[in-house]
Amino acid sequence: MSNCRNINLDHYAAIFKALSNPHRLQIFTILTGCCEPGTLCSTDEMMSCCVGDLDSQLNIASSTLSHHLKELSHAGLIEMQRNGKQVFCSINPSTLADVIDLFSNARSTPN
Amino acid sequence: MSNCRNINLDHYAAIFKALSNPHRLQIFTILTGCCEPGTLCSTDEMMSCCVGDLDSQLNIASSTLSHHLKELSHAGLIEMQRNGKQVFCSINPSTLADVIDLFSNARSTPN
DNA sequence: TCTACAGTTCGACATGTTTCGAATTGTATA
DNA sequence: TATACAATTCGAAACATGTCGAACTGTAGA
């Protein structure tokens, strides 16, 4: 009768909180549009995803950007990896899959 | 090369903000588990979705619940409809579809 | 009309968020 | 080692959020 699933409310709420700010959501969409999720862009590619590249697209102080990246990272939505002077950002595909799963189950509701 | 889509950041950010609170997320999951999205539970069914039923599952003041329902409603995630003394809540399937669409596009990234 | 029930609005308070500039850390190169 | 570049941390200010109890509104039934 009931199809309630025991999801971890706090975990998902933290993910949605990370996406609830327009700047963070913009970062998220830039990253999903940049690389195959789970891969790192090489610097040879037209579009890379280092912090500075995000900075140039976002029109906020770099300290603010850094704060937002930390929030996204803590929520498990992105991964960050230093390479020389730069830090490269990419989507964490496993968290993305979690979220897709949540909504997919919401759409098809068996009785 | 780039597969950037022009999404409405503020619209989606508002949706995620609505889902960023554990209590609101719980309401959302209760509602997705209760009825076929976009339909109203009749009072004859085992599980109904009026405000009082949510109240009994959430352990917060009813004024707080009311506030959260308004947030979900303003974000377009739920619909509310008075029937006599009670107000019934249901998922808005169109907003749900929007969100699923956003994440589905994020997962499969064409070059 | 009076009463009881179901929800909402109001006012207040504690807490959390967003943002910035300045100072700092880490890395590569001259 | 000195310098420049890339990014983070810190401290502060303005603003938003979550929560409650009390007061209120709307509806149905005695």
Image (cartoon, coloured by chain):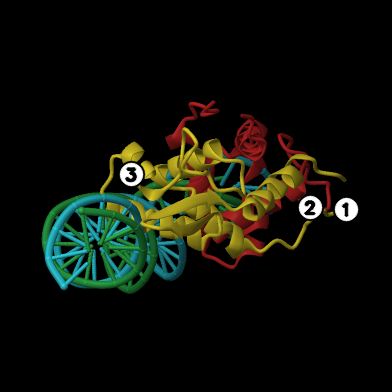
Chain colours: A yellow, B red, C green, D cyan
Instruction: Tell me, for residue B26, which label it has, or none.
Output: none
The residues tagged by marks 1 and 2 sit, at their Cα atoms, a distance apart of: 9 Å
- What amino acid type is highlighted by mark number 2? Met
Contact, mark 1 vs mark 2 (Cβ under 8 Å): yes
Name above or below for residue B76 compared with residue A74: above
- Quadrant location, the C terminus of chain A: top right
Q: Position of residue C9 (x, y in %)?
A: 39, 47
Classify mark 3: helix, strand or loop: helix
Q: CA distance from mark 1 to mark 3?
A: 50 Å
Q: Is residue B50 visible?
A: no
* Residue highlighted by disc 1: A1
Callout 1: 10 Å neighbours few (<14), some, many (20+)? few
Q: Amino acid at mark 3?
A: Asp
In what element is the residue under mark 2? loop
Mark 1 on the same chain as mark 2:
no
Q: Which of the two residues, C12 or B26, is positioned nearer the viewer here?
A: B26
Question: In terms of depth relative to the viewer, which is nearer, B31 or B44?
Answer: B31
* Residue B90 point in image, percent of width and height: 67, 41
Marks 3/2: CA–CA distance: 49 Å
Residue B47's label in the rendered image is 2
Q: Which residue is mark 3?
A: A55
Chain of the residue displaying label 1: A
Relative to A80, say whether D19 is above or below. below
Q: Are marks 3 and 2 on the same chain?
A: no
x, y percent for residue A80: 48, 57
